[in-house]
């Protein structure tokens, strides 16, 4: 890939990974509009790594406290709010792991197409709008509990369907369960760490066994651009979400879905 292509794709990945607008829907647009070839496994690993580093750095204090409390709970059996949150994140990760291993082949063979992405972009956008309008209670992430965590985890597993949006599905489920907008977003972002780490490990394994040529300069640039874009996205999304709600993202999803439908019927 040339430098322009690397920067554009890394920006798309970094900005859309944590917004409820579906990164998979956006990553197909450059190929459709500019006739770009697939970026390859190595670049996928790079930009996903950049996004993962962004959320880890942004939530470094929370993640350190959670990890320390979780380790302590293993030895003492005493639970704090940080250790409970850690256990809920682990529980919420299980559905995606199970579905990922059992349905990966089916999803890649039958669901990675523009028709599915257009439909899920619109349908899950409308669900996000409904959840945001119905949200009333305003729990924080330390009040989730294991039942709500499992439901949000199931929503995360559903997001393996292209176009759904991992953050969109988990934030939608969290809002439906009574979390505030900020807490829903924070819980969604924290949930992304184990899932993104696991996905990076699996894709790296596939890359090493593929024998694919690696352009280290492009990968380095992709990591840096994706990291910066994702970090900025997380920071400002959490700051403005309580004021503007989800409606702008819903409108954007509906417009994007209409654009994708245009590609189908043209």
Image (cartoon, rainbow, N blue to C red):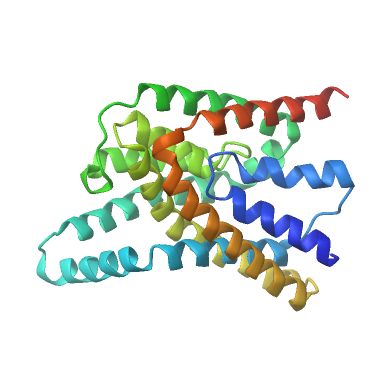
Residue 136 at what x, y percent from top left? 29, 26
- Residue at 48%, 37% in the rendered image: 169
- Residue at 83%, 46% in the rendered image: 31
Q: Determine whether 85 is above or below 244 in the image.
A: below
Q: Is residue 74 left or right of residue 20?
A: left
Which quadrant would the C terminus be assigned to in this image?
top right
Taking depth in this image into account, of 119 and 7 the one nearest to the observer is 7
Quadrant of the image occupied by residue 33 = top right
Residue 148 at what x, y percent from top left? 29, 38
How many discs mark residues in the rendered view? 0
Quadrant of the image occupied by residue 137 = top left
Taking depth in this image into account, of 226 and 197 the one nearest to the observer is 226
Residue 154 at what x, y percent from top left? 41, 39
Which quadrant would the N terminus be assigned to in this image?
bottom right
Q: Is residue 98 left or right of residue 202?
A: left
Residue 184 in view, yes or no: yes
Q: Determine whether 213 is above or below 178 in the image.
A: below
- Residue at 55%, 31% in the rendered image: 248
> Which residue of the protein is positioned furthest toward the bottom in this rendering?
216
Q: Determine whether 46 is above or below 184 in the image.
A: below
Quadrant of the image occupied by residue 2 = bottom right
Residue 108 at what x, y percent from top left? 67, 45
Residue 209 in view, yes or no: no
- Residue at 68%, 56% in the rendered image: 11
Q: Is residue 105 left or right of residue 216?
A: left
Taking depth in this image into account, of 40 and 262 the one nearest to the observer is 262
């Amino acid at each position: 890939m040339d430098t322009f292509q690397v920067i554009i794709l890394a920006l798309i990945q970094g900005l859309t990974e944590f917004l409820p607008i579906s990164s998979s829907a956006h990553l197909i647009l450059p190929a459709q509009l500019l006739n770009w070839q697939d970026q390859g496994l190595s670049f996928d690993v790079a930009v996903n790594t950049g996004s993962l580093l962004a959320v880890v750095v942004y939530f470094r204090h929370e993640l350190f406290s959670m990890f320390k409390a979780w380790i302590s709970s293993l030895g003492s059996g005493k639970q704090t709010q940080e250790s409970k949150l850690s256990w809920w994140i682990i529980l919420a990760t299980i559905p995606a792991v199970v579905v990922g291993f059992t349905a990966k082949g089916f999803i890649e063979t039958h669901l990675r197409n523009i028709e599915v992405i257009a439909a899920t972009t619109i349908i899950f956008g409308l669900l996000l709008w409904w959840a945001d309008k119905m949200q009333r209670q305003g729990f924080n992430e330390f009040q989730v509990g294991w039942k709500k965590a499992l439901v949000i985890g199931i929503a995360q597993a559903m997001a393996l369907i292209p176009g759904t949006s991992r953050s969109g599905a988990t934030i939608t489920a969290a809002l439906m369960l009574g979390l505030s907008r900020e807490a829903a977003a924070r819980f969604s972002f924290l949930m992304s760490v184990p899932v993104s780490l696991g996905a990076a490990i699996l894709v790296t394994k596939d890359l090493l066994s593929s024998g694919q040529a690696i352009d280290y300069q492009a990968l380095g640039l992709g990591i840096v651009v994706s990291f910066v874009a994702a970090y900025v996205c997380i920071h400002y999304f959490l700051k403005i979400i309580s004021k503007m709600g989800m409606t702008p993202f819903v409108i954007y999803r509906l417009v994007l879905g209409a654009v994708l439908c245009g590609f189908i019927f043209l």
